[in-house]
Amino acid sequence: MQNIKSERRQHQPVTKMTEKKAKGPTVTPQLARMRGQWVQETKEVTIKAPNTMLGVVKGSKDQPLRVVGLDKGLVHDAADHIKALVQKAVTTTVTIKAPNNMLGVVVGPGGSTIKEIQEKYKVRVSVPQKGSKDQPLRVVGLDKGLVHDAADHIKALVQKAVTTTVTITAPNNMLGVVVGPGGSTIKEIQEKYKVRVFVPQKGSKDQPLRVVGPDKGLVQDAADHIESLMAYEKERRRLSTPVSQTVFIPKAHHGLIIGRQGQNIRYLSLTRRITIVLPPKNVISDEVTVTGLPDQVDQGVRDLVNLVKSSTHICYNSDF
């Protein structure tokens, strides 16, 4: 009896497990054949794509995309479609090194220039933040040709905007000539030559004028214009500033300079607009001082020398 009971106990767990299995869904022979056929006939194509491109089509991290289906042709068509999507989404990036002070040229007033570039070439232009160093511009887009065209456009803008500076040494008393009444002269120069003219502050010393602009030729032309203005003003001031010159004429000939009743000296003084000063009669000196504007003084001195050399009186008009 004990052996029969123990055998029953040993077989009871097996019966329970069998009963539990029987409670699950039954796989019919037909369904099993269909599953086998699916596994046998299903076609699969795997596609390798950068993880950054998985957003184009749904995929898992670090796992290749898989296209699965019964129709081999359609599976490959779907795979080709996905490959085209990924290929189209692969971006081209070109970096451009540019001085930080040139970034405004690329951005333009209110961002107008960068917006125009992006719309024209179908790209994105990333400009470093203001104040950042050693950060290049980046041009990113789908079409490699358009990306490079946009980069060339930007490089041309930067190259054109690279400024040329010419310094001009000028006395402080000449700065007003460059500025002009109410800033009119400097404004005219800047507009004509497309430059910026930086004038030292009033009272500063040893600070040159600076002419700055993108076109080297126009910058130099503006600098030449400014230098010519200052040269003209310097000469004008020289000619309009009275000077004194001393000429040595023997005391014995001073009477010739004076002439009868002072006619000679009076004539020279009026016609040349100069002042002739002779030493007093009781002072033995050969010095004759001629004062007036530079050109007039030079001519007056020549007249005095010629008068003495000729030892004759100058003819005067009858109504003198």
Image: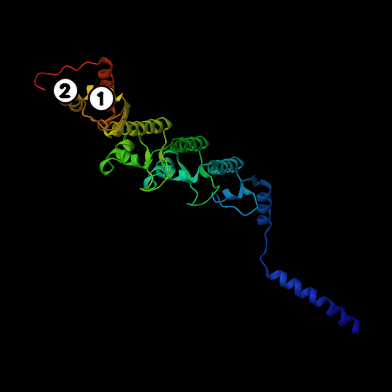
Disc 1 residue crowd, few under 14, some 14–19, many 20+, Cα 10 Å = some
Residue labelled with disc 2: 260
The amino acid type of the residue labelled 1 equals His
Classify 75 as above or below 7.
Answer: above
Colouring used for the render: rainbow
Give the x, y percent position of residue 91. 54, 43
Left or right relative to 112: residue 288: left
31 or 79: which is nearer to us? 79
Spot the residue most to the bottom: 1
The amino acid type of the residue labelled 2 equals Arg
Identify the mark nearer the N-term, 1 or 2: 1
Q: Residue at x 16, y 24 (%)?
A: 263
Where does the N terminus fall, quadrant-wise?
bottom right
Give the x, y percent position of residue 195. 37, 37
Give the quarter of the image for residue 193: top left
Residue 292 visible in image? no
2 or 297: which is nearer to us? 297
Give the x, y percent position of residue 289. 29, 30
Disc 2 residue crowd, few under 14, some 14–19, many 20+, Cα 10 Å = few
Give the x, y percent position of residue 163. 44, 38
Classify 201 as above or below 15.
Answer: above
Residue labelled with disc 1: 254
